[in-house]
Amino acid sequence: MSLAGTIRIVCIGDSLTAGSESADYPALLQQRLGSRAFVTNLGKNGATTGSVLRHLNIIARSEADVAVILLGTNDVLFMFDSRMKWVARFRGPSDPGTFAQNLRAIAQAFTNVGTRVLLVAPPPFGENPNHVLNHALAPYIEHVKHIATERGCKYIPLNEEIGRCLDEGKRKGSEVEPAATSLAYKALFKKRVLGRSWDQIADEAGLAFTIDGVHLNDRGARILVELVVSALEEVIAHEASQAGM
């Protein structure tokens, strides 16, 4: 496939991609790229690497030029958050080893049909780097990095970039519990009933880049969009240089 002309992009992921419970980063990516790209949102609330893998034959036939894959948040939550473990009984295992096996198969399915793959490191949980969920997330991110190198994919350091922004003074100091159901429901009520923006909801919760410690607001989503655009430009430049050799 050539990246000349309009680039066909598919975004694969969970609710951080789907955009109904958080900022819609694929829509923001479409706005950012304009007529240079056609972006399709294939995010699904509650998705894990395992659930995506079960539908991979359909997804990989999308004939996309580029696939942006953001998975892992639910894999961690269903594995390590005691409030979510009942879900794991229906979703299957999400331990780091199984996550890596699943993600590797997903990336390979796309590369096998010539689709360039961008693998995104899931964002931090909340704003406390020492939260137990962030410690649990660390090996998953290492797997994302390793698979990106192993399979020739681009690694998108969303976790590191949000962490850097928080360290530079943008942390609002909130001690909210990531993935607290009450906070998520409150955020959705404010969005759908009161018409608040995702950034307003985050500000009211005392958060910088998420609305509830998990789901991105527009500020967080724009960080992801800029990282994706930068990676796309690198891929295009590399292919142009290869074509000119």
Image: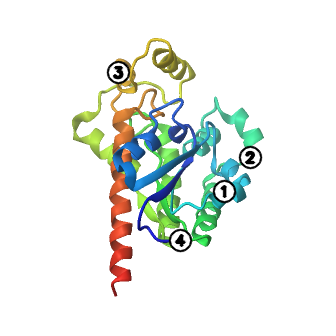
Which element is circle 2 on? loop
Kindly report the distance in space between the C-alpha atoms of the residues bearing marks 4 and 1. Answer: 17 Å
Kindly report the distance in space between the C-alpha atoms of the residues bearing marks 2 and 4. Answer: 25 Å
Pick the quarter of the image with the C terminus: bottom left
Q: Upstream in the sequence, badge 3 or badge 4?
A: 4
Spot occupied by residue 209 in the image (x, y as percentages of width and height): 36, 34
The residue labelled by disc 3 is: 200
Spot occupied by residue 50 in the image (x, y as percentages of width and height): 69, 51
Q: Is residue 153 visible?
A: yes
Q: Is residue 185 left or right of residue 91?
A: left
Give the residue type that dot 2 points to: Gly
Q: Upstream in the sequence, badge 2 or badge 3?
A: 2
Q: Are marks 3 and 4 in contact (CB under 8 Å)?
A: no
Q: Nearer the viewer, mark 2 or mark 3?
A: 3
Residue at x-position 74% and y-position 46%: 92
The residue labelled by disc 4 is: 151
Spot occupied by residue 239 in the image (x, y as percentages of width and height): 39, 75
Say which quarter of the image contains residue 168: top left
Give the residue type that dot 4 points to: Arg
Q: Upstream in the sequence, badge 1 or badge 3?
A: 1
Q: Upstream in the sequence, badge 4 or badge 1?
A: 1
Residue at x-position 37% and y-position 81%: 242
Q: Are marks 2 and 1 in contact (CB under 8 Å)?
A: yes
- Label of residue 98 in the image: 1
Kindly report the distance in space between the C-alpha atoms of the residues bearing marks 2 and 1. Answer: 9 Å
Say which quarter of the image contains residue 155: bottom left
Q: Upstream in the sequence, badge 2 or badge 4?
A: 2
Q: From the viewer's perspective, is residue 225 above or below residue 186? A: below
